[in-house]
Amino acid sequence: MRQQIAAANWKMNLTFDQAENLLDEILKVPHDLQAHQKVVFAIPFPYLQFAQNKISEIRNFFTAAQNCYTQSRGAYTGETSAEMLQSIGVGYVVLGHSERREYFGESNAMLEEKVAMALTYSLTPIFCCGEPLQIRESGAQNGYVEKQLKESLFNLHEEQIQKVVIAYEPIWAIGTGKTATAAQAQEMHAHLRKVLAGKYGDIIAGEIPILYGGSVKGNNAKEIFSQPDVDGGLVGGASLIAADFTQIIDALK
Ligand code: 13P
């Protein structure tokens, strides 16, 4: 059965005390998830080990990093490797977020290297893709997002692509309060699954989780997640509010 994931992307938010409180608030609620339903917290690097210790015993809960480097180790001041993340038990890594593409110049080619590195160290990449507003307005979004997938993922072998999670995040919906409609999300997710099927076949494409991200809130998650090709969400702002993120986790059910 295809996995469903509620993923929190805290981005560069929260002090340590705030992070601890938020996790405690969310974890004190019994979530009672099924085996194929997961909750992932993409946490700032300084708190990852702490968060990992806190949730490692909780079934179906995992930590993620928000980035990793293209190399395993060496003289790369300020960078963090997939090997380091694996060594503290982190399970996932968000790669190719539009903020990293825009502010840190991450290209499809660089992301191809990062995805490969994550897989080498048994991290599940949450590979982000999504179009800017002007591409959406010109109607060229399907081809744009398809290119991101092809250039970063399509050199993976069959057994590798099955370990990837995709997050479709239209840039115009990130942090704007303007979510894609459930129908727009479904349309793009179905398109991406078709593109994946063209390369890897229907069975493998049918098993790859595709999350939606962009102004997911407690009160719209259920409708978005109910779409047949939407397998959960990657959540920014609302993941910083315990009640909201709890509602989003419950929307998986
Ligand atoms: P918002 O939920 O704040 O729109 O952010 C989405 C996002 O970028 C998650 O990675």
Image (tube, helix red, strand yellow):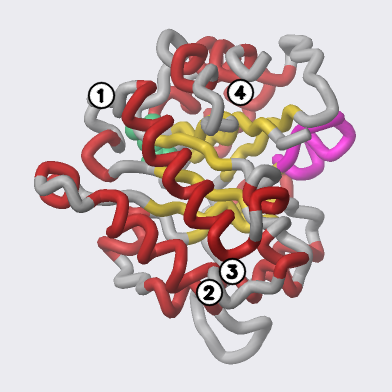
Q: Is residue 18 left or right of residue 219?
A: right
From mark 3 to mark 2, how far is it between C-alphas? 16 Å
Kind of residue at badge 4: Asn
Where residue 24 appears, x then y in whole percent? 68, 21
User: Which residue is rendered at x = 58% and y = 77% of the image?
Assistant: 155
Single out the mark in the foreground, 4 or 3: 3
Where residue 239 appears, x then y in whole percent? 49, 27
Indicate yes or no whether the magenta region holds residue 192: no
Of mark 1 and mark 4, the one earlier in the sequence is: 4
Q: Quadrant of ligand 1?
A: top left
Of mark 2 and mark 1, the one earlier in the sequence is: 2
- Residue under circle 1? 177
Q: Helix, strand, or loop for circle 2?
A: loop
Single out the mark in the foreground, 1 or 4: 1
Indicate yes or no whether the magenta region holds residue 56: yes
Observer-nearest of 75 and 153: 153
Single out the mark in the foreground, 3 or 2: 3
Single out the mark in the foreground, 2 or 1: 1
- Residue under circle 4? 21
From mark 1 to mark 3, how far is it between C-alphas? 29 Å
Of mark 1 and mark 3, the one earlier in the sequence is: 3
User: Which residue is rendered at x = 51% and y = 13% of the image?
Assistant: 222
Q: Helix, strand, or loop for circle 4?
A: helix
Magenta part of the chain: 51-62
- Residue under circle 3? 115
Q: Is mark 1 within 8 Å of ligand 1?
A: yes
Q: Residues within 10 Å of mark 2 (few under 14, many from 20)?
A: few
Observer-nearest of 100 and 160: 160
Where residue 158 appears, x then y in whole percent? 72, 67
